[in-house]
Image (cartoon, helix red, strand yellow):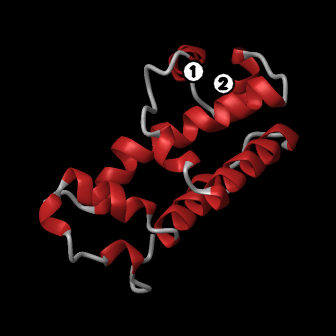
Amino acid sequence: MKPFCEVMVKNIFPAIRALIAKELMDNLHHTQNETATLMCITQPAISQYSRELRGKKVVILNSNAQVASIIKESAKTLAKQKEQKNTGIMCNICREIRKEGLLCKLHKEIAPSLKTCDLCMSTGCLC
């Protein structure tokens, strides 16, 4: 069985990065290089996100208005930073995705045997 953290890292984090990159470039008018610097990733990675070669699970994130709103706000937060620092953006988005049940939906698609699992929704999870 794949733990939900593995599903998050492999499927959801790239989609989050793709949506943040898109927001930074399309709506906040940053170049690929500026976006890469703000996100602490490489410009080629940004190029792959913009060409939709990475982060293909964006549909599941965009389907939820609350998650989509947090991602847009996160891009604005990154754009306003004067220095690169860990602001917990990915952790905040991850918590919201779990709270909204999107991770459970994806996890159950990947591993149908988990139809009764609710581990990622439990309060005992520390991540």
Q: Residue at x 35, y 65 (%)?
A: 104
Q: Do the residues labelled 2 and 1 touch (CB within 8 Å)?
A: yes
Q: Please state which amino acid type lies under the numbered disc 1.
A: Thr
**123, above or below 64, in the image:** below
Give how far apart the Cα atoms at labels 2 and 1 are.
5 Å
Image side of residue 119 versus residue 63, left or right = left
Q: Can residue 72 be seen in this view?
A: yes
What's under tag 2, amino acid-wise? Ala
Q: Name the residue under label 2.
A: 36
Where does the image place residue 15, in percent across and percent down from the top left?
Answer: 49, 39
Secondary structure state at the residue bearing disc 1:
loop
Q: Quadrant of residue 123?
A: bottom left
Side of 72 where 29 appears, left or right: right
Nearer to the camera, 125 or 110: 110
User: Is residue 105 shown left or right of residue 82?
Assistant: left
**Measured from the top left, where is residue 67 in percent x and y?**
62, 57
Would you place residue 60 above or below residue 58 in this image? Answer: below
Q: Where is residue 101 in the image (x, y as percent from the top left)?
A: 44, 68
Residue depicted at x 69% and y 56%: 70
Give me the residue at 80% from left, 48% from top.
Answer: 77
Examine the image and state in which quarter residue 27 appears: top right
Mark 1 lies on residue: 42
Query: How far from the left and from the top, in percent, is residue 16?
Result: 55, 43
Are there few (<14), some (14-19), or many (20+) residues within 10 Å of tag 2? Answer: some
Q: Residue at x 61, y 62 (%)?
A: 92
Q: Quadrant of the C terminus?
A: bottom left
Is residue 82 visible to us here? no
